Amino acid sequence: MSDDDRIPPGPYCYRAIGRCNRAMGAIKIERCPYWRGLESDAAGRVLRARCERLGLQDEFQRDTSLLWDQVKACGLNLDEAGDGPAA
């Protein structure tokens, strides 16, 4: 398995692996091994994050990327099953 194969499919820095609270709609996730939350507020919301693969860091409502919200900046493995262009 290459390092890029460890990056989850789709537009986010995680993959859903199940539900942890059906009533609330919460899901269990497996994060990308390169994503790091660097700072959170009192409610647990991530305010600063980093992609170790890219060496990129951003901040909530300060930068134009959405890495703090676990939206990919790397552009790798973006296609999910049925989500990419038709073959």
Image: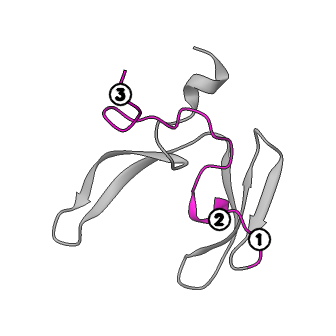
Q: Quadrant of residue 23?
A: bottom left
Residue 19, position as x, y percentages in the image = 25, 54
Instruction: Please state if 73 lies on the left or on the right of 30 as rendered.
Output: right
The colour scheme used to paint the residues is: one colour
What residue appears at the point 35 percent right and 27 percent down from the top-left corner? 86
Mark 1 residue crowding within 10 angstroms, few (<14) / some (14–19) / many (20+): few
Cα gap from disc 3 to disc 2, whole angstroms: 31 Å
Q: Nearer the viewer, residue 64 or 36?
A: 64
Q: Confirm whether the magenta stretch covers residue 67.
A: yes
Looking at the rendering, in which quadrant would you find the N terminus?
top right
Kindly identify which residue carries mark 3. Answer: 86
Three-letter amino acid code of the residue under disc 1: Asp
- Give the x, y percent position of residue 84: 41, 34
Tag of residue 63: 1
The residue shown at (54%, 32%) is 77
Q: State yes or no: discs 3 and 1 in contact (Cβ < 8 Å).
A: no
Is 82 placed left or right of 47 in the picture?
left
In the image, residue 63 above or below residue 29: below
The amino acid type found where label 2 is placed reads: Trp
From what the image shows, is residue 77 above or below residue 20?
Answer: above
Tell me where the magenta segment starts and ends, as one range: 62-87
User: Mark on residue 85?
Assistant: none
Distance, label 3 to label 1, CA atoms, is 33 Å
State the residue lying farthest toward the left: 23
**Residue at left offset 50%, top offset 36%:** 8
Q: Picture coordinates of residue 65 (x, y %)?
A: 70, 62
Q: Amino acid at mark 3?
A: Ala
Pointer 1 and pointer 2: residues touching (CB < 8 Å)? yes
